[in-house]
């Protein structure tokens, strides 16, 4: 079985501040991990993915995430927040034994204050 | 633009009715997935098709069914609609059957009155 927990349904940062969105996963086999972003009234856009290559993954728009097996975590960070980063962020996991279905976390709404 | 298209964008219907949602995957993608996004359930996987065949099933109600056609487009059929079926329905596609990223369409917002 696989599951994802996102700590904090709402995160608020100031423009220029560090963004840290937390994701912990549970998987019985090596997982594939993803971060998606959803802007209002739009579909999900892939930010980055981990598929067992480098543990530090760089994505689009300056985001990156680090896979830590010992902590079963895949936190998303960005050094300096922009107003345009305000959106909902979803962490997702899939694994070989369950095909490629994505199991999503509950999402974190990011607010960026001027 | 992900390259995945979904129609219609919005759908308003009454309880007990039947609707069909349509999805065209990215060019070259053989896998199509359907997800439901609602306030109380979050994002949930419904069903996956690969090259015309059902590959995996998730939390899909018996009132719901899907198929993938030879041209690889897919349809999700929802029948005997209930108020609780109101949600955003997303289609996604990918090249791989496992481990690959999925590209999401803009979704169909279904409102059941």
Image (cartoon, grey):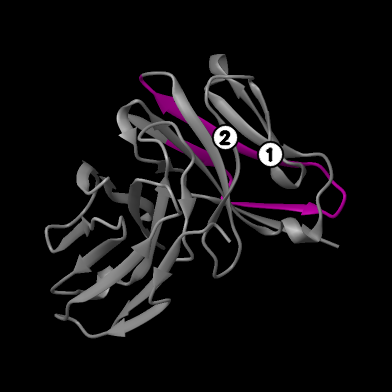
**Residue beneath label 2, please?**
A49
Q: Nearer the viewer, residue B100 or A25?
A: B100
Q: How crowded is mark 1: few (under 14 residues within 10 Å), some or many (20 or more)?
A: some
Residue drawn at x 38%, y 77% is B8
The reply, left or right, for residue A62 in relation to residue B6 is right
Tag 2–tag 1 contact (CB < 8 Å): yes
Question: For the residue carrying disc 2, how many other residues have a C-alpha within 10 Å: few (<14), some (14-19), or many (20+)?
Answer: many
Magenta residues, start to end: A4-28
Image spot of residue B110 (x, y percent): 34, 75
Checking the image for residue A59, the label placed there is: 1
Q: Is residue B54 left or right of residue A34?
A: left
The image shows residue A93, relative to residue B44, as above or below, that is above
Q: Which of A60 and A68 is in front in this view?
A: A60
Which of the 4 image quadrants contains residue B98? Answer: top left
Identify the residue at horizontal 30%, vertical 55% (top origin): B72
Could you tell me how far apart the alpha carbons at marks 2 and 1 are, in whole angstroms?
8 Å
């Amino acid at each position: 079985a696989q599951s994802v927990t996102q700590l904090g349904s709402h995160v608020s940062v100031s423009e220029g501040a560090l963004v840290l969105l937390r994701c912990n996963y549970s998987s019985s086999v090596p997982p594939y991990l993803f971060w998606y972003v959803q802007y209002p009234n739009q579909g999900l856009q892939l930010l980055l993915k981990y598929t067992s290559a480098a543990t530090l993954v760089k994505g689009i728009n300056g985001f990156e995430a680090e896979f830590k097996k010992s902590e079963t975590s895949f936190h998303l960070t960005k050094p300096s927040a922009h107003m345009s980063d305000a959106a909902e962020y979803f962490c997702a996991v899939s694994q070989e034994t369950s095909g490629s279905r994505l199991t999503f976390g509950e999402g974190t709404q990011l607010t960026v204050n001027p | 633009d992900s390259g995945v298209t979904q129609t219609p964008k919005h759908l308003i219907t009454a309880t007990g009715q039947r609707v069909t949602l349509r999805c065209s995957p990215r060019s070259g993608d053989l896998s199509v997935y359907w997800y439901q996004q609602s306030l109380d359930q979050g994002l949930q996987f419904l069903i996956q098709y690969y090259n015309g065949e059902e590959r995996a099933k998730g939390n899909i109600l018996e009132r719901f069914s899907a198929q993938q056609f030879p041209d690889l487009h897919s349809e999700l059929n929802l029948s005997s609609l209930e108020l609780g079926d109101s949600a955003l329905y997303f289609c996604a596609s990918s090249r791989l059957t496992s481990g690959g990223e999925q590209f999401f369409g803009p979704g169909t917002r279904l409102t059941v009155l």
